[in-house]
Structures are given as structure tokens and as C-alpha cells.
Image: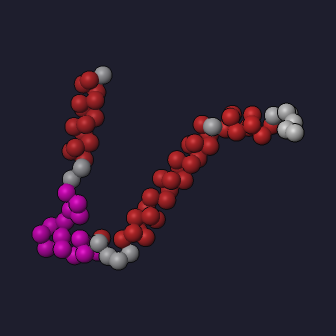
Amino acid sequence: MKALAIGFLTALFLLIGPTAMACRVCRPRVQAAIHTPEYSANLLTLLLPVGALLLLAAGVFYAPLIKARFLSSTSHG
């Protein structure tokens, strides 16, 4: 298990490279295109599917509890 964790962390660190990888000539243009005034909107647009998938996963995980709560036949009052 320890070897698996070490392998996973090594692969993760190797995949994390410098931001905006490009050649020396193109790098300033690539970085300038990424860091524009629309950066926040682009980031939120990029992360929106992640939030939707997390919401869907939570719904599937908690579906039995939600179904039991709404279909319970106990009366309040």
C-alpha cells in the first residue's frame, strides 16, 4: 500500500509541470492569453462540469435516504 501511495504521488508530481508550457518565443503570448480579465469567468466555466458531477454523485449516493424521507407514511401533527 505504501509503494502504491509513493507511486501515485510520484506520478502526480511528474504531471504537475510549469504553467503555460510553450517555447521561449510563444510563452509570453500564451501567458497573456490565459491571464486576461475574463480569467474568473473562464475558470468557473471550466469547473462547472466538476460541480455538476459532484452534485450528481451526491444525489446517487444519498438517493435511498432521500427516497425514504419523502415516501415515509408518518403524519406530522
Residues in magenta?
18-33
In the rendered image, residue 29 lying in the magenta stretch gets the answer yes
Quadrant of image for the N terminus: top left
Instruction: Give the quarter of the image for residue 62.
Output: top right
Q: Which residue lies most toward the top here?
A: 1
Quadrant of image for the C terminus: top right
Q: Which residue: 44% across, 58% down?
A: 47
Instruction: Give the quarter of the image for residue 20.
Output: bottom left
Name the one closer to the observer, 20 or 54. 54
Name the one closer to the observer, 14 or 54. 54
Q: Position of residue 44 (x, y in %)?
A: 44, 64
Q: Which residue: 22% across, 37% down?
A: 10
**Above or below: residue 16 compared with residue 21:** above
**Above or below: residue 66 compared with residue 15:** above
Q: Position of residue 58 (x, y in %)?
A: 57, 42
Q: Position of residue 46 (x, y in %)?
A: 43, 62
Q: Which residue: 50% across, 56% down?
A: 49
**How are the residues colored?**
secondary structure
